[in-house]
Amino acid sequence: MAVAEPARQSTTQETGVKRKPERDGFSTHIGALLATLGSAVGLGNIWKFPAFAGKNGGAAFVLVYLACVFVVGIPLMVAELSIGRAARANAVGTFKRLSPKRPWFLIGAGGAVAAFIIMAFYTDVAGWVFAYVFRALTGALPTTVEGTSAAFDQLVSSSWEPLIWQWIVLAVTTTIVMAGVKKGIEGAIRRLMPALLVLLLISVARAVTLPGAAEGVAFLLKPDLSRLSWSVVLLAMGLAFFKLSLGMGTMITYGSYMPEKSNLFLTAVRVAAADTTISLLAGLAIFPAVFHFGFEPTAGPALLFNTIPAVLGSLPFGRLFTASFFVLTAAAATGAMLSLLEVPIAYLHEERNLPRRTAALITALGIAVLGVPATLSTGPLAGLKIFGLTFFDLFDFLSQNILMPIGGIAIAVYVGWFLRRQKLLGEGPAARYVSAALKFVVPVAIGIILLNGLGLFA
Ligand code: TRP
């Protein structure tokens, strides 16, 4: 909490001086890169990206998405990582150190609140994934779409079962984060990422060697410029934002654990490239098999929980393929959840001086409480609506359409206009590019997403 009396608001020299030498962090460049990738890779790669790409122009959508990543995603990620590393503090403390006595720390506070809200429904879905791992391994999953959708409806509409899975997810992820940044988060990601990649490559190999696979590959990648429209661009931009875990302090917190000399621009580019590759591989693992069996390509829960088990389950060794697909999805979701948990935990630990374990327990408890209405909103509480939305949809809407875009604009404006670029972003063409994007392009682009999300262009 002790902050050196600052001479001026924009002075950044004192940052880093006050930090405690024993502060936890990522141990190597590669560890930092993997952990950041682990945050980006999540449910979004599996149930959002492939289906969005398939429906909105294939390779043409991928190009639009990459443009959004380059113009909005990477500059914002570099901004977040840079301020976190400069201050060596949690999402709130970062602003308090860089700009003491200014209200900028509210950005970090909003991020911590967003983390609870996102986790409330993300752990619900992750719970379903964990349940499916269990069911696939025990052979309890049907292999027809009618069967799987009935089983899925039964799971999400009961009261205790999804809650218990959600608590299992919270217990697992909280236990990992409790062990610390290096031992817990980085250690877990170093195991999860290779497992995820191996299982993904196996799934891709199986899918693309099925008869008729070409149709699925074409669905995912065939460039169709006629599908592109203004609303597809907005969709791609929103997706880039969620995929790269931006706008709510995750990357600020992870930046604060980065080694001094990591090149943050390169880190951001690599994370975005690897994350997009994983999304495309997921698409290659899913759609050839979907088309092989003549299923409809869908998105969201229906794709993940109804179509995939039916498709994979009807292959030879189907139970094994289904189980490995859900294990890889669980691994992806876990890495993302670790990064979400770390935002409030680091805040409570550093700003409120709580022991890390206590901070983790309070965070998990808060999410568990907030998670109850989200989880029950597909069951007993389905009729309870606020502004016409169930709790699940409300949390989803609040975080993605309001809190994250506002956070993103605020961070871009703060770093672009209120901090001195030379100190923070360094010199050279990459820094100039990031700075220019943060000043002009990012606030306008996210402003449009925000207005769009609020339904103003509908
Ligand atoms: N990027 C993750 C996914 O694609 C989700 C996620 C993790 C996230 N951390 C985040 C989203 C922070 C927003 C903010 O599933």
Image: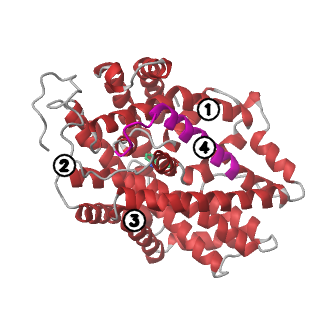
Label 4 near label 2: C-beta < 8 Å?
no
Dot 1 or dot 2: first in sequence order is: 1
Label 4 near label 1: C-beta < 8 Å?
no
Query: Where does the image place residue 45, in percent across and percent down from the top left?
Result: 60, 49
Q: Is residue 417 left or right of residue 297?
A: left
Is 266 included in the stretch rendered in magenta?
yes
Residue type at mark 4: give it: Ala
Distance from label 3 to label 2 (Cα)?
21 Å
> Is disc 1 placed on a helix, strand or loop?
helix
Dot 3 or dot 2: first in sequence order is: 3
Q: Residues within 10 Å of mark 4 (few under 14, many from 20)?
A: some
- The magenta span reads 257-282
Q: Which residue is mark 3?
A: 176
Q: Nearer the viewer, mark 1 or mark 2?
A: 2
Q: Is residue 116 left or right of residue 198?
A: left
Q: Which residue is mark 2?
A: 351
Dot 3 or dot 1: first in sequence order is: 1
Q: How was this image coloured? A: secondary structure
Q: Which residue is mark 4?
A: 274
